[in-house]
Image (tube, grey):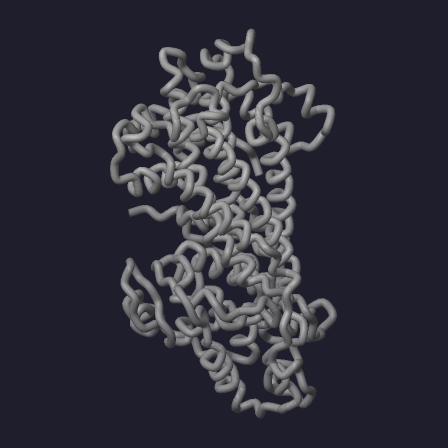
Amino acid sequence: MSVTKLVIEPGNMTLEAMRAVYRGTPVPEIDPSARAGVEQSAGMVNAAARGQAAVYGVNTGFGKLASRKIAPEDTAALQRNLILSHCCGVGAALERDTARLMMALKAASLARGASGVRWELIALIEAMLAHGITPVIPAQGSVGASGDLAPLAHMAAVMIGEGEAEVAGTRMPGAEALSQAGLMPVVLGPKEGLALINGTQFSTACALAGLFGAWECLEASAVTASLSTDAIMGSTAPLLPEIHALRGHAGQIEMADAMRALMAGSEIRESHREGDARVQDPYCIRCQPQVAGACMDLLRGAARTLWIEANAVTDNPLVLEGEGRIVSGGNFHAEPVAFAADQIALAVAELGAIAQRRVALMVDPALSHDLPPFLTPDPGLNSGMMIAEVTSAALMSENKHLANPCSTDSTPTSANQEDHVSMAAHGAVRLGRMVRNLSAILGVELLAGAQGVEFRAPLSTSAPLRRVLARLREAVPTLGEDRYMAPDLERAADLIRGREVVTVAGVELLP
């Protein structure tokens, strides 16, 4: 079986490449041209370990214990102890795709040649990725400063033959996972344990996973909003390009363009251009370009921050080879990631909030322009989409709570040595839950919009939206009499998450 490989140039990894690694398509490899610089910086660290001058983390203890000098013969034990003592994560394991992205980001960062590790460590991470060895990484335990210490320690533990790993769906001891693949655990040299666990790769990978999911939901919202607009016989006048050009926001303009293309040629729309007593549609219909467009702009800003961070060197101390110095700094502080995660959370919450109002609009006979109550052909005997709408409201409310900022929180740790932290880790981890909620909200909107459009027969919607309806009906039949609905909601959400709705509709909004 052929394996697709992706060569990563340290410092120049694109968002597209990161998304490909996250989606599991290629096996990432570091450009071998980086090896010379990596080995040179490792040589500097080895020399420092044998010297008399105190160099943090090389021949000293860590954190508040940095004043304790370590003998050269104890440096290997120092690094091993560091990894084992920092494996203090708790909670559910990080999703496999996110863990693999984190590993690729760590390898790329180490390959910048400023961390002082041997090429052997980078090669082992590459081999683990190639053989499908994914460390089991508890998702809780990092405060997003001094690096994502606990999560990255769980990754490093497998590299030294400890901890747990997952291979082909089976959890096993880390040493066994390496052995099955013919790999040997690494014996850590000076600073190597510290380089592995110091850094923001856990927070960054989780934030990138949230970003990718949020963008896919943003694209899908153009489809579901267009379907809802036709279902309630809404106006397309608010999509006129002149309106959005007058304001000038790029996202708003693009969302209006996408929706205009999606609804072009709809018989439903053409049927009420004249004689419609309604002057204006509710905001959830009329202002979708303004709201989703603002979310688009926000996500693009967050994407740039995360792209920079993913290509950065964020451990400590750093080897400045050109100056011949090893210097302590604070690149491990994940404040940029925390801000980006909060921005993504705001966009996700708002996309869900406006989508949920469209669902509420469609099930309400007082507002839906003659659609039957709760979108059922026999209301009273049947409840139709009554509780599906309630579920969407519950998820919307949950996302509002989760969207509260994490970056404004801080708590001192490590005996007050690390006295201001970013909380980027849980800011980023919560995005996975929020995106799952959003995809479910949009799935409910997809079901409601489809049901509403079908009630407009014999009038039909546009060609792109008819393709969406056809794909949906392959997975979920039209709702007639009441039935067990949970599988319907899950299948609709899967069509959102898998980009099937976006693909069949022909929507592409570039990040």
Of residue 474 and residue 486, the one placed in the foreground of this image is 486
Marker count (numbered): 0
Of residue 225 and residue 242, the one placed in the foreground of this image is 225
Q: Is residue 459 visible?
A: yes
Residue 392 percent coordinates (x, y): 44, 42
Residue 380 appears left or right of 82: left
Where on the picture, by quarter, is residue 11?
A: bottom right
Q: Residue at x 56, y 47 (%)?
A: 14
Of residue 453 and residue 299, the one placed in the foreground of this image is 453
Residue 354 percent coordinates (x, y): 54, 37
Residue 409 appears left or right of 80: right
The extreme top residue here reads 274
In the figure, 211 relative to 239: above or below?
below
Q: Residue at x 64, y 60 (%)?
A: 407
Residue 331 percent coordinates (x, y): 66, 66
Q: Residue at x 64, y 69 (%)?
A: 410
Residue 500 percent coordinates (x, y): 39, 33
In the figure, 189 relative to 128: above or below?
below
Q: Residue at x 50, y 84 (%)?
A: 76
Q: Quadrant of the C terminus?
A: top right
In the figure, 53 relative to 452: above or below?
below
In the figure, 186 relative to 15: above or below?
below
Q: Is residue 47 visible?
A: no
Where on the picture, by quarter, is residue 257?
A: top right
The extreme front residue here reads 380
